[in-house]
Each structure stands twice: as C-alpha cells, then as structure tokens.
Image: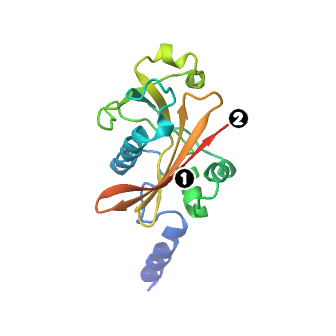
Amino acid sequence: MHNRLAALVILWALPLAGCSAEQPNEMSSALTETDLQVLQTVVRDWDQADESICLHERTNGVILVHSSTARENNPTQIRADIGDQHLPDNLIRAFLERNAASAGLPADFSADGRTIITNVEDRTIFHQTYRFPELYPKAKSFMHFSLPAYMDSGSTALVRFDFGPTHHGATCTYLLRRENDRWIVVWKKTAHYA
C-alpha cells in the first residue's frame, strides 16, 4: 500500500517540478533537431523578407548567423517588441527559461546554402552600418538567434533574433505552427530601436 501511495505522489509531483514528458527540451539550452528545423524555416522566410535587406545594394547576399544563441531575460522588452501581437505568458516564461544560457549552432547549420555561421566576439560591428559592408562584402545582413521555445505539445514555436546591420539595433519575433511535419510562419514582428 505504501509503495502505491509513494508512486502516486511521485507521478503527481513530476509535472509540478517541471518534469513533464510533453516537452522534454523546453528547459534545456541544448540544441535539438526540432530547433534546427524551426531556425532554418525562419532563415528561409527572413531571406525573402524586405526587412532582411539591411544593405539595399545587396539583395542577393548571404546572411551571417552568429555561432552561439543569445540570452534573453526581459519579458517587458518582448511584449514591447511584438506590439499588438499576442503571446501567452507561459510561452514567454518558457522562452526566457530556455534562453537563460547560450547554446552553440552547428558549423553546418544552413538554410539552402544562404547562411554563413560566424563567431564574432565584437557584435557592435553588426550595428556599424558603415563598417559592415567592408568587413563582410558578400553579406546582406546578420542574425543572432535565441533558442526557440514551444507550447501546445511542441506544435507552436516562438523564436527571436537580433538583426542588422542597423544604426541602433533591431529584433524580430516569429511565432510558428507545425502543420503536416512542416513549420509554418503564423506571424512575425520587427522592432527597430532608436
């Protein structure tokens, strides 16, 4: 009897402790295959977006992607950046928890050969629009991702990234949904800082 009661208590307590089988990687900063699929979908979509052409003379340039993911810790900034779009509180919490630490992107990360992984220590170069073209003559823009966070049993994903070059910095937030084994963009919102 005591063994059954102990087992029931453990099963009841696991979800409260964050040990839900529904999304095993939600709290981990390790990159998963699903993360790579989501990020590649975002890069392909971003490559076609007008906002990705930060240097207007380079519409066919490659996109530089930073080799490590960005850390996120400000829910107020996320809400301000998305304006009138809605994100559930639990998804924002999962996103912030997932991005408490940085993760590395694999060197072979690519979306149709249009990206180059780079490890630039001084990211301020990406905000210097006058230096970016001379330092990266084949690039049209850069992206610095945060890890995706998931909800709805992993069928909805939230992704954010810094992009540029811009004078004062900019971010883009994507919400994606999985349909028939493919990730579909539900909405995206850019924010430029002054």
Q: Residue at the spot x=40%, y=38% of the render?
A: 47
What amino acid does circle 1 point to?
Phe
Q: Quadrant of the C terminus?
A: top right
Tell me the CA gap for discs 1 and 2. Answer: 25 Å
Splitting the image into 4 quarters, where does residue 157 fall?
bottom left
Which image quadrant is residue 124 in?
Answer: top right
In x, y percent, where is residue 176?
Answer: 44, 56
Residue 166 horizontal/vertical position (percent)? 59, 29
The residue carrying pointer 2 sits among few (fewer than 14), some (14 to 19) or many (20 or more) residues within 10 Å by Cα, namely few
Residue most extreme to the bottom: 1
Instruction: Look at the picture and state if 114 lies above or below 124.
Output: below
Would you identify the image quadrant in which residue 115 lies? top left
x and y percentages locating residue 193 in the rendered image: 67, 37
Q: Residue at x 58, y 56 (%)?
A: 92
Question: Going from the N terminus, do you reach mark 1 or mark 2 first?
Answer: 1
Q: Residue at x 36, y 34 (%)?
A: 106
**Image side of residue 45 versus residue 101, left or right:** left
For disc 1, the marked residue is 95
Q: Is residue 81 left or right of residue 110?
A: right
Q: Amino acid at mark 2?
A: Ala
Q: Judge by depth and name the residue closer to the eye, 134 or 160.
A: 134
Label disc, if present, on residue 194 of the rendered structure: 2
